[in-house]
Every structure is written in C-alpha cells, then in structure tokens.
Amino acid sequence: MRGVSDLLSALCGGQQFVLRMVDSPEEVRSVIDALTEFWIAFGRCLLDHVPPFHGGTGAFFYGVWCPGKTIWLQEDAAALLSPRLYDEFILPADRRIAASFEHSVVHLHPSRFIPSRQFADTDVDVIELHIDKGGPPAESLEKHYRAILAKKRLLVWGDITDEDLVFLLTRLPAPGLAIEIVVPTTDEAGRVWDKAMSLIQARA
C-alpha cells in the first residue's frame, strides 16, 4: 500500500508536496495525521478480510510469504525529501504505521535520500531496498545494506545484474538477507539460479 509520502505526492503533486512542508507545515501535519489514521484503519480492514495462507500473508508481485498478518508499506516519494523533512514530517507517521501491525515490510527506492537508518529504528520487520534498472548498483548501496542488516531483515528486489549478484552473495552477511531477481524468461531464470548456487557453494 502506498505510504504517507506517496499519498501526499498524489494529492499535491511531486513538487508541491515538498514545498508545502516548508510553506504550510501545520496544514501538512494535519493532512499527514488524517492520512496515517486512514492508512492504519484501511490496512487493518484489509488484513481482516484477507484469508491466511499457511498461517501467513502473501505479498502481491513479490511472491513472498510473510508470517502472521503482514502489511506492506511503500514510500517511493520519500526519495524526494531531505533527511530533515522526512524526519520531521513522514517518520512519525511511518513509526505509527509500523507499530500498529503485527508485521510490516517497507519498500524503498535507492534514489537520492534513502531513509534506511530511520526505518532500521522503527518496528518495521523487513526493509526492501529496490535495485532499479539504470539506478545505482548494489555495491554503491553497501552502507545502507549493512545499516539495515545490523538491525532488520533486508530484501533486495529488482533488475539485478550479474555484478550486483556477485556483490550481494559474496560481500554481505547471509543471515537476514533475501534476494529477488526480475528476469524476462525462464531460461534467464535458470542461468541466474545456477550462478547464484555456484556463488553460495563457493562461499560455504
């Protein structure tokens, strides 16, 4: 589900929602409070109506099983904020959301500002830091990965190159790390699987 920064961006526009934080902070705080309450109520309603799958919850196109009642939070538009604006306006809402559910996963993009440190100190269980096609490679995100893995589980999902895969499977600690690779064909999936298994066996 789209998070508070995404909802603000949709309501105000990608540029205007940032400017309004500066020009009309009290108005924005009031809107954020209302959006957060609605988000939590809607999330609880959703989970109440989704039947459990083997005692857990599925997660749309990730194809990942999560224990218990797990909610997914997406904060794409947080990348447009400065650390100060995120901490002041969005982080309190994300803390409330994470604390309101049995389990939660947050989806982030690695463009400009990445609130990895902030989410590592919330009740979120898993932080998914996307790899975008044409975006920064995995190696350049090492400090974020390690900050997350020091406190949380990390899911790396997206257009992962062979170089990204080598880095992820040889340089990062394995406990708490999950990798999901987007591939165009079953043949490519088989090739990537074989490469991953060879890297894992060499590490063992």
Image: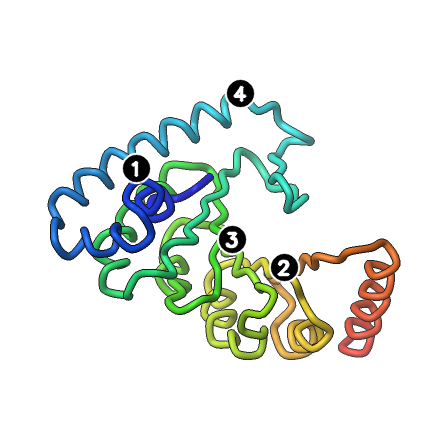
Measured in 3D between alpha carbons, the distance from the residue under mark 4 to the one under mark 1, in whole angstroms, is 20 Å
- Amino acid on which disc 2 is placed: Gly
Identity of the residue drawn at 78% across and 71% down = 200
Spatial distance from mark 4 to mark 2, Cα to Cα? 29 Å
Which residue corresponds to mark 4?
49
Question: Where residue 9 sits in the image (x, y, percent)?
Answer: 33, 47
Q: In this view, does 183 lie to the left or right of 143?
A: right
Of the numbered discs 1 and 2, the one sitting upstream in the chain is 1
For the residue marked with disc 3, what is the amino acid? Val
Residue that numbered label 3 is attached to: 126
Which callout, 4 or 2, points to the residue nearer the camera? 2
Are the residues tagged 3 and 2 within 8 Å (C-beta)? no
Q: Which of marks 1 and 2 is in front?
A: 2
Nearest to N terminus: mark 4 or mark 1: 1
Mark 1, other Cα within 10 Å: few <14 / some 14–19 / many ≥20: many
In the picture of the structure, the residue carrying the numbered disc 2 is 158
Are dots 4 and 1 in contact, CB under 8 Å?
Answer: no
